[in-house]
């Protein structure tokens, strides 16, 4: 009996280093068994759960088609389509902000002219034009102009074409007779304008052309154009319609309305580095503000001329749009022929007129005409050549058309360059 007790005691001593009582030792072993049981049960449940499909948030099971592909629920695919549609619409609006703003201004003026007439009565058009050219001066960067010195013969040709040669197209336009004749006169005035303030440079950059050369031609032609426009209108247009234009008064008005705001904006940019940094950091914002200000002018002019516009037959307006399209194609062909001729007489393939980057720059810039300056000129004429709204409306269409045509041209160049590079790589 004593021997048995001693053996039992030694057995408990071996099984527990801390001399725990027998009941406590039994609880530990029982707890360990329960933990192991729970762990094995959990593993089994996890394996079983993984064999099932996950439950969607919409509460619908996945359905597979005959090819084994999982069909998304209609609510999910519908929301994705709406998001994709909104993104596409937003991208289109961002890429075509200026044409959309101009079309919206014209549409609002025709639909409800009362507010536009009120704005015109308080000379809002002068403030908007002033703001457009202040913004043009703020966004005008001349640091790259030095890079175009090498291509100065191309720049000279571009300036001669813009200011002296292409205004002759106005005489051809005036040979066409439409009713109202203001459509024809407006396009003739449009052909006497300098190049666009931003579209030509932007499209040159997209085409991989000499953007410094495009910028130089834009700056110089718009500054010289303010001085040349009154004489071009007096020589080519006023004489053709039998009206005398007050050249000195028009020149003074253009200097006050266009040149001084442009110089003022440029001085602000060059005088304060913070202003230049802010403008350069918001390169998309300022062109949109300028586009909105520009759309206010045709909005007021169309509102003022709504009664006359409603009397115009649709086929007459379509004919005016066709004239604007023909004008831009004719300018492209004329400048392409001029560039090719100068290249042949100045060294062939080694000439600066044969370099692809220079050709794209001068062809785009010299073939476009600016709408803001044309609108400002019409405002200063005060009806001397016809009703302002009728003069401006076909030019809005021509301005939009020239951007669309040149966009296709830039895309064609980019595609051709990509194809030639693929051939070279192959």
Image (spheres, rainbow, N blue to C red):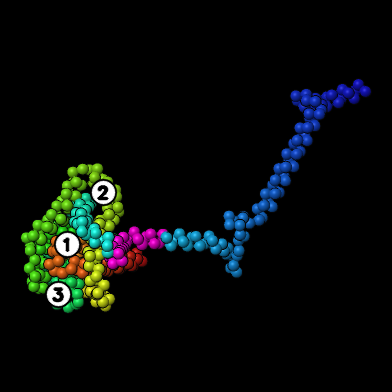
| Residue, disc 3 | 174
Dot 1, crowdedness within 10 Å: few (<14), some or many (≥20)?
A: many
Q: What x and y, as percent, mark residue 39?
A: 71, 42
Point out the frontmost of discs 3 and 1. Answer: 1
Is 230 displayed left or right of 405 in the figure? left
Left/right of residue 415 with respect to residue 73 in the rendered view: left
237 left or right, relative to 135: left
Where residue 63 sits, quadrant-wise, is bottom right
Q: State which quarter of the image contains the C terminus.
A: bottom left
Q: Report whether residue 103 is seen.
A: no
Give the residue number, with chain letter if any, for mark 2: 279
Residue 280 in sight from this viewpoint: yes
Please provide percent x and percent y for residue 266: 18, 49
- Report the Cα–Cα distance between label 2 and label 3: 42 Å
Residue occupying the point 44% across, 61% down: 84
Discs 1/2, front: 1
Question: Is residue 124 rendered magenta in the image?
Answer: no
**Dots 2, 3 in contact, CB < 8 A:** no
Q: Quadrant of residue 409?
A: bottom left
Observer-side mark, 2 or 3, equals: 3
Which quadrant of the view contains residue 111?
bottom left
Q: Main secondary structure of the magenta part?
A: helix
Q: In the rendering, at what x and y percent does residue 19 appear? A: 78, 24
Tell me if residue 289 comes above or below residue 345 in the rendering.
Answer: above
How far, Cα to Cα, is label 1 from label 2? 29 Å
Task: Tell me the crowding category of disc 2: few under 14, some 14 to 19, or many 20 or more residues within 10 angstroms, Cα based.
Answer: some
Residue range of the region highlighted in magenta in the rendering: 87-112
Q: Are marks 3 and 1 in contact (CB under 8 Å)?
A: no
Kindly identify which numbered label has been placed on residue 379: 1
Q: Evaluate if marks 1 and 2 touch, with contact meaning CB atoms under 8 Å apart.
A: no
Which of marks 1 and 3 precedes in the sequence?
3
């Amino acid at each position: 009996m004593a021997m048995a007790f001693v053996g039992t005691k030694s057995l408990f001593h071996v099984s527990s280093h801390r001399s725990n009582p027998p009941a406590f030792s039994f609880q530990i072993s029982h707890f360990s068994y329960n933990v192991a049981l729970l762990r094995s049960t959990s593993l089994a449940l996890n394996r079983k759960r993984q064999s099932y499909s996950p439950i969607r948030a919409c509460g619908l099971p996945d359905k597979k088609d005959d090819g084994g592909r999982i069909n998304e629920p209609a609510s999910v695919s519908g929301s994705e389509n709406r998001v994709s549609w909104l993104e596409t619409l937003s991208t289109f609006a961002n890429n075509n902000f200026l044409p959309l703003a101009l079309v919206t201004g014209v549409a609002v003026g025709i639909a409800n002219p009362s507010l536009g007439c009120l704005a015109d009565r308080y000379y809002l058009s002068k403030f908007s034009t002033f703001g457009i050219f202040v913004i043009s001066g703020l966004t005008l960067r001349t640091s790259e102009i030095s890079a175009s010195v090498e291509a100065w013969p191309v720049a000279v040709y571009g300036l001669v074409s813009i200011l002296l040669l292409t205004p002759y197209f106005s005489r051809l336009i005036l040979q066409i007779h439409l009713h109202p004749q203001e459509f024809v006169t407006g396009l003739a005035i449009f052909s006497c304008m300098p190049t666009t303030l931003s579209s030509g440079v932007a499209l040159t950059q997209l085409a991989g052309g000499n953007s410094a050369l495009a910028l130089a031609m834009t700056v110089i032609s718009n500054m010289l154009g303010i001085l040349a426009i009154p004489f071009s209108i007096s020589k080519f247009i006023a004489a053709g319609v039998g009206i005398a234009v007050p050249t000195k008064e028009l020149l003074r008005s253009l200097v006050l309305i266009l040149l001084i705001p442009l110089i003022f904006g440029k001085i602000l940019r060059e005088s304060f580095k913070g202003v230049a940094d802010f403008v350069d950091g918001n390169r998309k914002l300022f062109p949109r503000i300028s586009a909105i200000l520009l759309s206010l002018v045709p909005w007021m002019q169309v509102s003022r001329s709504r009664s006359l516009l409603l009397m115009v037959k649709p086929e007459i307006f379509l004919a005016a749009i066709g004239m604007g399209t023909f004008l831009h194609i004719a300018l492209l062909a004329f400048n392409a022929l001029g560039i090719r001729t100068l290249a042949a007489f100045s060294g062939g393939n080694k000439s600066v007129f044969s370099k692809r980057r220079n050709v794209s720059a001068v062809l785009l810039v010299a073939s476009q005409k600016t709408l803001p300056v044309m609108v400002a000129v019409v405002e200063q004429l005060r009806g001397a050549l016809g009703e302002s709204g009728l003069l401006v409306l076909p030019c809005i269409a021509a301005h939009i058309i020239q951007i669309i045509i040149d966009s296709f041209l830039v895309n064609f160049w980019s595609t051709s360059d990509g194809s030639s590079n693929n051939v070279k790589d192959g």
